[in-house]
């Protein structure tokens, strides 16, 4: 995630080209919309979604239009060449969870990123053709549109096609991002994003005719991407570059509808991402632990409330490391992990005055399934997960809500652009565990369930989440940020539910993060040194910001969220001032 520090002043102007309330709002006020709203990392993508709703479409039409538009205006993370998760809750209460996560190609092997000595080959799962997993984004968005949208694929693709063909003006951050040194290693990426070395300047128009043609082909014949000429062309460019993906891999890609994870927190219903994401399980496990504390009484971001919350994160991430992976390949004991009794047992292990030591955590022995599983599987493996993803939230006039988190993994993915097709390919193979027991750049630990295997989906942290109150959608939440996605969603959710913030205040509020190992409490730069001092006295290793690999910075994540006011019905959009996102409503 590239953090847009210049936006720390957080002046959000609500009157977005007349589409939202004309009232200019201060930094702590969300954008108010009377009918529908889209919040994403790019104004043009949010606007594409709103146009669909104004044309009679529903929240799914808007989400698909926003997703395709992000592939054009946010190629760093929005994508055709990656994957994602879409959580839909219709106003009648029906929920759908679409898993269009990438899959390992058939030729993938468990040790494919190890050298002859068994050491991880640095960068092999991140940069270049061998890092690429079979993309699912096009399948997922087409599936969503055809099954749950009201408009045609041609209609929802029109804004993206227009943006690719006519171009859009690059801002300073975007023009700077295009300088990525690894992009320059791939001729097609260098040609398109770096104009062969004559770099784009801020304010210049960036046009993508190859991508426009690909989008037009998808609109005309969506099946072609996986079963027709587009599939053959994509497979040929992958093979030419030394990648593993074949036309057969593409033909075998399938979107999966899964049951979302469900829990409750202080009377609110939480609906979130199931495996192969760890997001919903870890979120609900942590909230179950926290439910027994009166956090509101301890007050927002007091040392005591941070202590309890961190201890809950620590325990939920400890379990993530042991158990999480692709549910089609391993049994994931989700029911036990999100059981309230298990949360209570974990809570009983927390000392109110002192930080736990991560390495000394002992799982409560209340479910034999967990003990058996832990005893019969190899120990957790280290893994690095990229924070470069993007999230968008949608609510329409009927109250249908959609939360989508989508990724090509690293910023610019594998840096490979599919030749002649104009879109970047993911490096999602990096979300598998390459080798047991070796700490990685971000120190994130994962279990054997996430070893590489043909046809398998790598473990994710993406956490598109919808919170329901009195039978109606209340919050639509999500963020990029790898493991920090989960703690960011928790921070925002608790900001509203526990501390009574409005959604914009909750998004703005300084974040804190712990993921079991490394045994560090990360806090954003905005934290009070006095609070940090109190936490250090409790035994915490507090670090301001992040200092690991590409994941270094003073602030993190990009929460693009919505709340619905129960009384007025207004849709309240909160884009994250840490980036250049925008809530657009009408
Ligand atoms: N690649 C980031 C995630 O799936 O969590």
Image: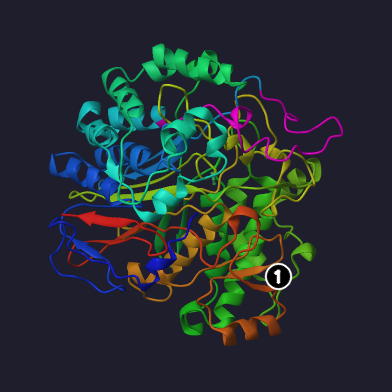
Q: Secondary structure at mark 1?
A: loop
Task: Give x and y (percent) for residue 380.
Answer: 75, 47
**Residue at horizontal 80 percent and vertical 41 percent from the top:** 376
Q: From where the camera sits, is residue 476 visible?
A: no
Question: Quarter for ligand 1?
Answer: top right
Q: What colour scheme was applied to this rendering of the protein?
A: rainbow
Picture quadrant of residue 230: top left
**Vertical side of 336 occupied by 509: above or below:** below
Which is nearer the eye, 316 or 32? 32
Would you say 343 lies left or right of 381 here?
A: left
- The magenta-colored residue range is 108-137
Would you say 570 lies left or right of 373 here?
A: left
Q: From where the camera sits, is residue 16 visible?
A: yes
Would you say 396 lies left or right of 366 here?
A: left
Picture quadrant of residue 354: bottom right
Residue 136 magenta-highlighted: yes
Picture quarter with the C terminus: bottom left
Would you say 157 lies left or right of 249 here?
A: left
Q: How many marks?
A: 1
- Residue at numbered disc 1: 349
Task: Give x and y (percent) for residue 284.
Answer: 52, 57
Task: Give x and y (percent) for residue 95.
Answer: 36, 43
Which is nearer the eye, 161 or 585? 161
**Residue at horizontal 40 percent and vertical 20 percent from the top:** 225
Task: Give x and y (percent) for residue 123.
Answer: 68, 39
Residue 400 magenta-highlighted: no
Q: Provide the major secondary structure of the magenta segment.
A: loop
Which is nearer the eye, 545 or 290? 545
**Vertical side of 390 occupied by 224: above or below:** above
């Amino acid at each position: 995630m590239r953090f847009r520090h210049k936006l720390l002043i957080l002046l959000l102007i609500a009157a977005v080209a007349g589409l939202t309330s004309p009232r200019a709002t201060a930094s702590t006020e969300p954008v108010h919309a009377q009918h529908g709203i889209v919040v994403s990392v790019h104004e043009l993508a949010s606007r594409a979604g709103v146009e669909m709703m104004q044309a009679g479409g529903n929240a799914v039409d808007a989400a698909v239009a926003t997703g395709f538009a992000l592939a054009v205006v946010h190629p760093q993370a929005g994508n055709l060449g990656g994957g994602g998760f879409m959580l839909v809750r219709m106003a009648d209460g029906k929920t759908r969870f679409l898993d269009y996560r990438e899959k390992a190609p058939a030729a993938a092997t468990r040790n494919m990123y190890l050298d002859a000595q068994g050491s991880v080959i640095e960068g092999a799962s991140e940069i270049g053709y061998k890092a690429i997993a079979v993309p699912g984004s096009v399948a997922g968005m087409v599936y969503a549109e055809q099954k749950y949208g009201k408009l045609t694929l041609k209609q929802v693709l029109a804004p993206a096609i227009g943006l690719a063909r006519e171009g859009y003006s690059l801002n300073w951050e975007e023009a700077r991002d295009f300088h990525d040194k690894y992009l320059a290693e791939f001729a097609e990426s260098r040609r398109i994003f770096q104009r062969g070395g004559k770099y784009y300047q801020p304010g210049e128009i960036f046009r993508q005719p190859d991508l426009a043609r690909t989008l037009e082909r998808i609109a005309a014949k969506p099946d072609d991407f996986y079963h027709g000429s587009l599939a053959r062309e994509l497979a040929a460019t992958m093979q030419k570059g030394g990648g593993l993906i074949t036309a057969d891999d593409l033909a075998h890609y399938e979107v999966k509808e899964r049951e979302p994870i469900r829990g409750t927190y202080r009377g609110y219903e939480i609906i979130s991402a199931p495996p192969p994401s760890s997001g919903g399980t870890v979120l609900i496990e942590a909230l179950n632990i926290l439910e027994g504390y009166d956090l509101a009484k301890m007050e927002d971001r007091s040392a005591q409330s941070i202590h309890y919350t961190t201890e809950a994160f620590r325990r939920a991430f400890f379990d993530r490391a042991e158990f999480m992976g692709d549910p089609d390949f391993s049994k994931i004991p989700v029911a036990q992990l999100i059981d309230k009794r298990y949360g209570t047992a974990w809570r009983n292990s927390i000392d109110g005055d002192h930080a736990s030591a991560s390495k000394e955590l002992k799982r409560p022995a209340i479910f034999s399934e967990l003990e058996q599983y832990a005893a019969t599987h190899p120990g957790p493996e280290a893994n690095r997960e990229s924070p470069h993803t993007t999230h968008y939230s949608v609510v329409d006039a009927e109250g249908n809500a959609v939360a989508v988190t989508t990724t090509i993994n690293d910023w610019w993915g594998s840096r490979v652009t599919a030749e002649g097709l104009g879109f970047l390919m993911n490096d999602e193979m990096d979300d598998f565990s390459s080798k047991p027991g070796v700490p990685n750049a971000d120190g994130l630990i994962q279990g054997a369930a996430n070893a590489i295997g043909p046809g398998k989906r790598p473990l994710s942290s993406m956490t598109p989440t919808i919170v329901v109150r009195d039978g109606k959608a209340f919050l639509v939440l999500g963020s990029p940020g790898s493991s920090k996605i989960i703690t960011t969603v928790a921070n925002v959710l608790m900001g509203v539910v526990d501390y009574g913030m409005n959604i914009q205040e909750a998004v703005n509020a300084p974040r804190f993060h712990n993921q079991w190992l490394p045994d560090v409490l990360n806090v954003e730069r905005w934290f009070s040194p006095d609070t940090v001092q109190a936490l250090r006295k409790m035994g915490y290793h507090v670090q301001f910001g992040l200092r690991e690999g590409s994941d270094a910075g003073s602030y993190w994540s990009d929460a693009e969220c919505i709340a619905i006011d129960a009384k007025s019905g207004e849709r309240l959009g909160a884009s994250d001032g840490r980036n250049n996102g925008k809530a657009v409503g009408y």
